Image: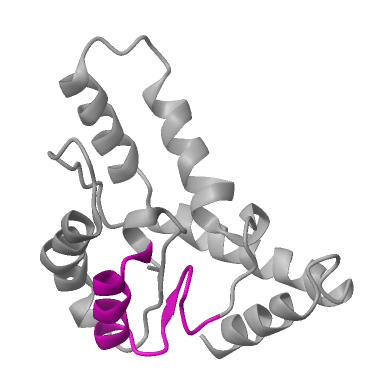
Amino acid sequence: MHDRVIGPFFFTEKTVSSVVYLDMLENFVFPQLEELQPRVFLQQDGAPPHWGTIVRSSLNDHFTGRWIGRGSPIPWPPRSPDITPLDFFLWGFVKDNVHRRRVSNMDDLKGRITTAVASVDADMLAGTWREIEYRLDILRATKGGTRGSSLTRVMKLFESI
């Protein structure tokens, strides 16, 4: 989202299955994105719970043609951290903030993660969008580099947003 980050969400189950993941999407993520439809795209990685038939079916219902991930209607180059904001910005930012001092227990860890995510402001997100645009400009100039046609489709997607 352009001006805020949703989350974090902490699973209480020891194992996150497709059923558990779908419950989180339907009860935590989707309600927060409702007001932004149809201008929002949802992106997820290829973790096994994200790949379940029930998850993909729900995403097709809630984000018809607007979700990115394994088996999605939008092609996305696999292992592409250079154009994935969670990879090139958010995870490193949260990790740097969480591990400034030794974590004492699980509650301390969750609190630090929550604080780090809450500290991501609109200016930081605007900078991230500018960085995406810059990175896509590089891909355009190099005609997708080694990633080729799948990046051409990604660039067209971002041009439509």
Query: Which residue reaches farthest right?
Result: 142
Q: Is residue 50 magenta?
A: no
In the rendered view, does 33 fall on the left or right side of 147? Answer: left
**Residue at left 38%, top 55%?**
48
Highlighted range, magenta:
51-74
**Residue at left 50%, top 62%?**
126
Q: Quadrant of the N terminus?
A: bottom left
Q: Which of the pair 29/64 is nearer the observer? A: 64
**Residue at left 46%, top 58%?**
45
**Residue at left 18%, top 69%?**
32
Vertical relation: 52 (above or below) 75: above
In the rendered view, does 63 fall on the left or right side of 34? Answer: right
Q: Position of residue 30 (x, y in %)?
A: 19, 72
Q: Quadrant of residue 25?
A: bottom left
In this picture the colour scheme is: one colour
Q: Quadrant of residue 5?
A: bottom left
